[in-house]
């Protein structure tokens, strides 16, 4: 009798997906063998995003999956993941869906992959375990993914918004229209604070004497720099 192992994965974006094929190996580079074919995979675009197989040899084995369409075409294999490991992308997707169940999981997953990739440059975002990120980073990436998912759905669809939820922020149109962009801006700001990705720059004018008198190259009547207001980039000049 096999060992039960839950597998979390990214749902496919292809239409007409007919089955999920699960393979296992004793190590990450080992020879994989198929242990189960799942035909109850949901329907486009709401395919399953996790499955518990009862046919695993051991919990700490390595697993990979691929999908098969109704026409018999297989997708590429997923990266091999050790049993009992939850990926960072899936953790973020779960948290975003918890905050806004109305969002499409496929879109949320696409945005989560991009956000994780930005915060872990040079690494495959689909292989990073959740343990590699701090709680604050996870919160920041969750808020950023939520904001981008809302931009990709709520705002991109156009039209008026009568009710809008972004995490703990809920807006509902009454006599005045609700502006969802303010809630999204708040989410992005919060995410940047957690991730340390926001940046502000203050540009100050160099302290120079526009008359040239203090540098000895002006042929003017002896003007000199009296002061500089850097808050307004204004120079005050006195002339003799």
Image: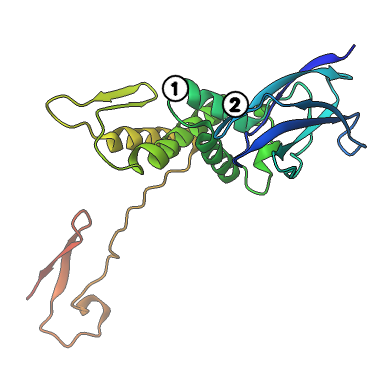
In the picture as drawn, the residue positioned furthest to the left comes out as: 240
Instruction: Return the residue nearer the eye: 35 or 191.
Output: 35
- Quadrant containing the N terminus is top right
Image quadrant of residue 51?
Answer: top right
In the picture as drawn, the residue positioned furthest to the top comes out as: 1
> In this picture, is 99 found above or below 202?
above
Q: With 81 as the anchor, is 109 left or right in this view? A: left
Q: With 138 as the anchor, is 155 left or right in this view? A: left
Q: Position of residue 4 (x, y in %)?
A: 79, 14
> Is the residue marked by circle 1 packed among few (<14), some (14-19), or many (20+) residues within 10 Å?
some
Q: Residue at x 45, y 30 (%)?
A: 103
Where residue 99 is drawn, which disc sits there?
Answer: 1
Q: Position of residue 238 (x, y in %)?
A: 9, 70
Can residue 133 be seen here? no
- Disc 1, disc 2: CB below 8 Å? no
Instruction: Return the residue nearer the eye: 26 or 194.
Output: 26
> Is the residue marked by circle 2 packed among few (<14), some (14-19), or many (20+) residues within 10 Å?
some
Can residue 140 be seen here? yes
Counting residues from the start of the chain, the first of labels 1 and 2 encountered is 2
Label 2 sits on a secondary structure element that is helix
Instruction: Return the residue nearer the eye: 53 or 218.
Output: 53
Q: Residue at x 30, y 23 (%)?
A: 170
Q: Residue at x 38, y 40 (%)?
A: 151
Q: Position of residue 166 (x, y in %)?
A: 37, 27
Label 1 sits on a secondary structure element that is helix
> In this picture, is 42 found above or below 109?
above
The residue singled out by tag 2 in the image is: 91
Image quadrant of residue 74?
Answer: top right
In the picture as drawn, the residue positioned furthest to the bottom comes out as: 219
> In this picture, is 163 found above or below 239?
above
Q: Position of residue 192 (x, y in %)?
A: 44, 38
Separation (CA) of disc 1 from disc 2: 13 Å
């Amino acid at each position: 009798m096999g060992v039960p192992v839950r597998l979390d994965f990214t749902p496919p974006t292809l239409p007409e997906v007919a089955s999920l094929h699960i393979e296992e190996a004793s190590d990450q580079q080992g020879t994989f063998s198929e242990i189960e074919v799942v035909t109850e995979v949901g329907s486009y675009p709401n395919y399953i995003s996790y499955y518990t197989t009862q046919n695993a040899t051991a919990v700490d084995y390595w697993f990979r999956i691929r999908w098969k369409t109704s026409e018999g075409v297989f997708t590429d294999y997923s990266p091999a993941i050790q049993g009992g490991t939850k990926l960072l992308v899936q953790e973020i997707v779960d948290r975003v869906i918890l905050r806004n169940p109305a969002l499409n999981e496929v879109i949320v997953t696409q945005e989560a992959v991009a956000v994780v990739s930005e915060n872990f440059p040079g690494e495959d975002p689909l292989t990073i375990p959740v343990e590699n990120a701090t709680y604050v980073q996870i919160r920041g990436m969750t808020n950023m993914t939520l904001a981008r998912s809302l931009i990709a759905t709520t705002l991109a669809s156009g039209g008026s918004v009568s009710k809008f939820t972004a995490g703990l922020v809920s807006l509902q149109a009454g006599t005045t229209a609700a502006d969802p962009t303010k809630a999204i801006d708040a989410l992005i700001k919060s995410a940047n604070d957690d991730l340390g990705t926001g940046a502000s720059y203050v540009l100050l004018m160099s302290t120079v004497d526009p008359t040239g008198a203090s540098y000895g190259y002006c042929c003017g009547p002896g003007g000199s720099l009296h002061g500089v207001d850097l808050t307004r980039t204004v120079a005050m000049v006195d002339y003799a």
